[in-house]
Amino acid sequence: MEELPPLKAQTFRHLVSDPPSRSAKSTAQFSLCTYNVLHQELISPGRYPTDKNTELVFDPSRRRRMLQQDLQQLEPHTDIFCFEEMSPTTYEDFAKSLGRSAFGGHLLKRQANRPLYNAMFYRKSKFQLEQHHEINLHEGLSSLHLQDDNLKEHQAMDFFAICNHFIFIENDNNAGDIPKQNKKKHLLVMMAHLHHNPVDDVIKYAEMSQLLNSVARIRQTIRTNSNGEDDVFTIVAGDFNAQPTNQVYRLAVMGGTPTLSSLQEETMVLPTWLEQRQAWLPLYQQIYQQTTMVGTLDSVYSAYNEKGGECGHPRYTNLTDGFKNNIDYILYDKSKLCPIRLLELDVATYEKEDYLPSQFHASDHVPLWAEFECR
């Protein structure tokens, strides 16, 4: 059996001057990881060309063990996991490793015609699952007047995301000096893997709109049921297949009606893509008008400030042959949550070869992790 790369100690970047220790953690803090693990069926020399150690890179058994190793390193630090491009086999492997008594989980097929699944695990000692939602991100497409045949095809496709509604478990043993209150703390975690094709960017934009509308609707229901007394905290995470300059990211974080000028500001866009997006500008604007904005969302890794990164982000979360940029995010409501720590990206490992996956890292994406304190 081929030996795996040696484990490296994980390092965390503190965003506050006096971060709480994990052992002293109260229900006012939690941590979350999002990671696109790269489905085995997508790995082939045609899609991921490599001339170095091809057998090691594509070997299913070795990749499986490498992903297990990633999970085992992250588990002690993580309360919620969001995984994209899962398979039922990988889900069962992860559920077994995490321990079904310690972590609850959900697996949801992203779309009918592809074998890709989303999965979310949560620490049972930290959270009570109040409600599990399966959100069809293409539900809103029916209201759009789509003339393009490629776009019309998406109206007939279901395309799902997971939204879990948790309640923080009050634990007198680790609550520290925080007084126990009658009102509950609710956490909404929406995770999604948005449409990948850059040619159909407006579909991805519509998916983000539906995602935000769903979060806003669920939050309002919680507030109504508690007469506005309970706190509701919000996380939106996953693989958005959109760079920080893309309209999809702008919709979630910045808002504002799309314009020709804002379309032209996106980086790494082929002229033919830009021409098509400009033709679809009325569609972008119609979708924007139908979107309920979710408070003050921001990307936690926008505080990473790595040299060469866009808008303060790391240089990349996805590194493949011909593409290197940020498309994975942990968005949080900055009016209610304060980031405490981020996982440092292991650039030394990721860049041992020119692109991912490699013999040193099993996926073409990197894991993102953040710890938050509730305001």
Image (tube, rainbow, N blue to C red):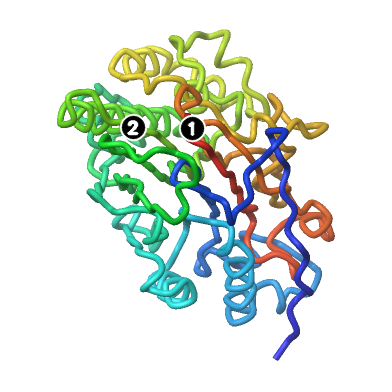
In percent of width and height, residue 270 lies at 63, 29
Of 23 and 191, which appears nearest the observer?
23
Marks 2 and 1, how far apart in space?
A: 12 Å
Crowd rating for badge 1 (residues with CA inside 10 Å; few <14, some 14–19, many 20+): many
* Relative side of 109 to 263, left or right: left
* Relative side of 341 to 137, left or right: right
Question: Three-letter amino acid code at disc 1?
Answer: Tyr
Compared to residue 66, the image places residue 257 above or below, namely: above
Query: Quadrant of the image for the N terminus?
Result: bottom right
Task: Confirm whether residue 276 shows in the render.
Answer: no
Q: Residue at x 46, y 10 (%)?
A: 256
Compared to residue 151, the image places residue 65 above or below, namely: below
Image quarter of residue 49: bottom right
Q: Earlier in the sequence, mark 2 or mark 1?
A: 2
Question: Three-letter amino acid code at disc 2?
Answer: Val
Secondary element at image label 1: strand
Q: Residue at x 17, y 24 (%)?
A: 227
In percent of width and height, residue 187 lies at 36, 40
Residue that label 2 marks: 232
* Relative side of 259 to 305, left or right: left
In percent of width and height, residue 32 lies at 51, 49
In percent of width and height, residue 276 lies at 49, 23
Q: Residue furthest bottom?
A: 1
* Relative side of 150 to 98, left or right: left
Mark 2 and mark 1 residues within 8 Å of each other at the beta carbon? no
Residue that label 1 marks: 332
Compared to residue 44, the image places residue 259 above or below, namely: above
